[in-house]
Amino acid sequence: MPDPARREGRDARLWSLLNRLLGKGAAPQQDASIRQPAVAGRDLLEQLENLFQGADDVKIRRITLGEEGAEAAVLYIDGLVDAARIEETLLRPLMSWAGQASPAERRVVGRTPELLAQRVLAASEVALVRDLEEASAALLRGDVVLVLQGDRQGLQITNRGWQSRPIEDPLLEVTIRGPRDGFTENVMWNTALLRRRLRDPSLRVELFSIGRRSRTTVAMLHLASIAPDQLVQEVRRRLNAIDIDGILDTGYIEQLIEDKWWSPLPQHLRTERPDRAAAALLEGRVVIIADTTPFVLVVPATFDSLFHSPEDSYDRWFPVNLLRWVRFLASVLSLIMPGLYVALVAYHPGILPTEFTLRLMASREGVAFPVLVETLLMQFFLELIKEAGFRMPSSIGQTFGIVGGLILGDIGVRAGLVSDAMVIVVAITAVSSFAAVDRELGTVLRLLGLPVLLSAAVLGLYGLTMALLLILAHLCTLRSYGVPYLAPYGFYPLSDWKDSVFRAPLRHYRHRPAYLSPKDPQRMGRGSQGETGGED
Amino acid sequence: MARQPDNDVLPVQALAIIVWNALADINFLTAPRDIAQAAGRDGWLAVVLAFGFVAVAAWLPVRICQRFPGMSLVEISQYLLGRVAGGLLTVLYISYWVVIAAFVLHVESNLITTTLLMETPGWVLTAYFVLVSTYLVWHGLEPMARMFLFFVPLYLLPLGALMLPVFVDAELGRLLPVFNGDTEGLVRGTWLTFAHGFGISVVWMVMPHLRPTKRAGRAALAGVAFVALPAIALTAVILAVLGPEEVAAQTYPTLLLFEMIEVPGFMGFRLDPLFLVVWLAMAFSTVALLQYAAASATGRLLGLASNRWLAVGFGAVLAMLGAWPVKQMDLILWSQERIPWAVTVTALGLPLVLFVLGHLRRPPATGRRPG
């Protein structure tokens, strides 16, 4: 029977070591108490066995490299590696070499990991692991580790092969025209999707391991010839400063590195479209991709850019302008519609056309509640239907939304809970908020409509105006990585306005947005100006 | 792209926007009455002349601040007049800005309680107003300038759209003959119009934040011109539509003008609330600028690194002064008697003295930089 005190000490050391291993790179300033002596063991194999004791998914395949060679073991985590490729690139070459090599060669090469990597293994990516920490980190990443008995070093063979969703259409950012591929949960596939679009050697992919326990691979991408160094450094600094146990989605990163956590407005662009991310890189922005999520962050974000759809750049300028205006108008409506209705009905019915006022008042006859309660009630119903629709299975969610909306609206009016006009107001608010390109922005604007509504309910048009001024003031004070949130509206060159509330013809986009301070401001040469040289 | 961006550094174009917002405030609501009372049908001529003086009032602090780069009224006055006299001058300006901001708040709450919210206590409106302005001032000058930029179309588009339909009813004969010989009336009208540019002295506190200041003079004059043109047009239209006597008799003649508009096919649809909303935004920018100027000058006088809590303090003072019960007529009479003198002294008289002294004395080797 082992001594319980000794066993307890070993367990404590094991836990400490695990913490140290899993926290590497994620916590720049770790607690010194985490750093403990290594796990007991004569060699790396024994240390790894001790470390992963009880982890049944850690597989150890022992092999003998001939009588003169050492005993070896191949370690990997089941499900994270490609078993067929282990066979092909590792086991078969090893066994074959062990059978064919001369005893002298087996004696030398079979006991030296570096020589094995150089002369025997067929894997494309092999690296030396010098200690337990590196070996276990490689295993946890999904690599294969080859260790020789009696040796404190080993080899790490990249052989990741976990199952992943194939590249599919983006779920949320649906467009009619444009590429169909979307980001997946695999970070390296995602970087490859961008590499495919931007075959520029200055595209930098910087990998981080964030999350003390999750050790999530996070990639920061930028075009070194365009993105300003200060921005890149700032993003790098914020990513390095994250100290958390796990990153399960870019949403975690977003909330930990945003400029003002208390602002309701999104301060990063989120996209699952590689074409949108590539366009952002071309403008001089930085893209952040995390493993296990298809949602990618783009910084800096501006309020204006949240209204831009990827296909705005693919379609011709004329229809795009109309659609962009519709989106802006829809956002304003989703923000002010309930408040405006309450202000007009409760305080200033006299300013509306007489006939309209009479009809409005007639529709409110028999409604049991004051207009504010009526509005809040309908807003609540709207959120209820929306939330329930999302949670329901997709096959009946849509039907539920339509039926629920119709029934609640119709019965609500008949029962005297709400007026006809109110149903229209809430319907316009809902439809307007769903017209936003950025899903979160649409929701935020609709929810910001609530304080606007309350302000209007207390002080009528005055309250509405002051609430809108407050929101505008907040927008003006916000910044995303130093870039004013309302850029390009402000003191920037007029060329920056070419892709704002108006979208100029593509041939006029000769410069990148100046508010992003790109290193290379020129985007388009004069050659690509069509027949008339862009002067028409 | 700074890690901690400086919210107190402005490009020179921002000065035009700030001057524009400092001038385009409650003036277009109340000025036509005062002008018509003094100058009658030559009121529009008084506006033309007055904006010449306003341009001088905008240009003077710019020139002085260009001579003393990085310095505001606080440092310049102390350098030229001595520590005590300069300090007293700064206190005078701070008091002026606070009183004028309180005056604007009073006009604002009076107007809203007489037109839109008859039963709402004025202090509620004032408190809400000051709360929002304090939030903006707290964040510095750059967000303020950015926000005021949005007010330019908000002001010009509805004003233009609302002036066109009433122009149909204008009798241009009411403006003729140009200059009826009443020189005294014209001079008084010019003076009263000039007195409505009471926000112009905030330029003193904005100039140190401009980078660079080379074209600041042009920017300031552009800001004045952008206000002058609609102001002249509005005065002429009001006088031509209502007539000088009617304009002089009304408390808010501009508002009356817009109450007259009827949208074809929309019987009973009133557009004056839209006009009031626009005016609210303009009053907001004036109060915020005056609040900023007061907080900034106090901060510099006391040698504080940040003006944020001073902005909150001045917000509280403004909320109290704005809620002080004052009768509307008393306020109008007070403003007609006192404000013209106060504006003349602060916007023209004292800057002229500082301008002369500033050219007699060599600037210091290094000016004090903001922040």
Image: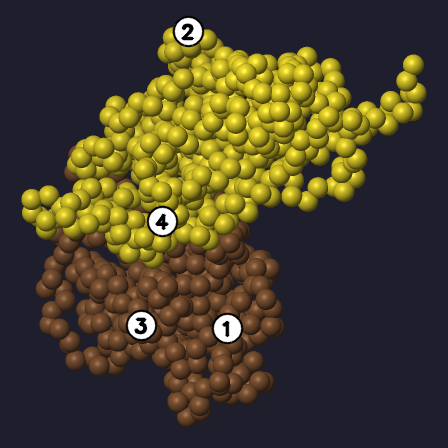
Q: Which residue is mark 2?
A: A396
Q: Nearer the viewer, mark 3 or mark 4?
A: 4
Mark 1 and mark 4: Cα distance apart in space:
33 Å
Q: Mark 4 falls on what kind of element?
A: loop
The answer to whether marks 2 and 3 sit on the same chain is no
Q: Which residue is mark 4?
A: A226
Looking at the picture, does residue A121 appear above or below residue B319? above
Label ID, residue B369 = 1
Do tag 3 and tag 4 residues touch (Cβ < 8 Å)?
A: no
Q: Nearer the viewer, residue B332 or B56?
A: B56
What amino acid is labelled 3 in the image? Arg
Give me the residue at 55% from left, 44% from top. Answer: A238
Q: Nearer the viewer, residue A85 or A97?
A: A97
Label ID, residue B215 = 3
Give me the residue at 30% from left, 22% from top. Answer: A180
For disc 3, the neighbor class at 10 Å (few under 14, some 14 to 19, many from 20) is some
Q: Does A292 sit left or right of A168 as displayed?
A: right
Give me the residue at 52% from left, 17% from top. Answer: A93
Mark 3 and mark 1: Cα distance apart in space:
19 Å
- Earlier sequence position, callout 3 versus callout 1: 3
Please state the horizontal and vertical placement of residue A148, each as a whole percent of the image. 67, 24
Q: Does residue A473 appear in this view?
A: no
Q: Quadrant of the N terminus of chain B?
A: bottom left
Give me the residue at 58% from left, 17% from top. Answer: A98
Chain letter, yellow in picture? A
Q: Mark 3 falls on what kind of element?
A: loop
Q: For the image shown, how many numbered marks are present on the structure? A: 4
Label ID, residue A6 = none
Mark 1 and mark 2: Cα distance apart in space:
65 Å
Do tag 2 and tag 3 residues touch (Cβ < 8 Å)?
A: no
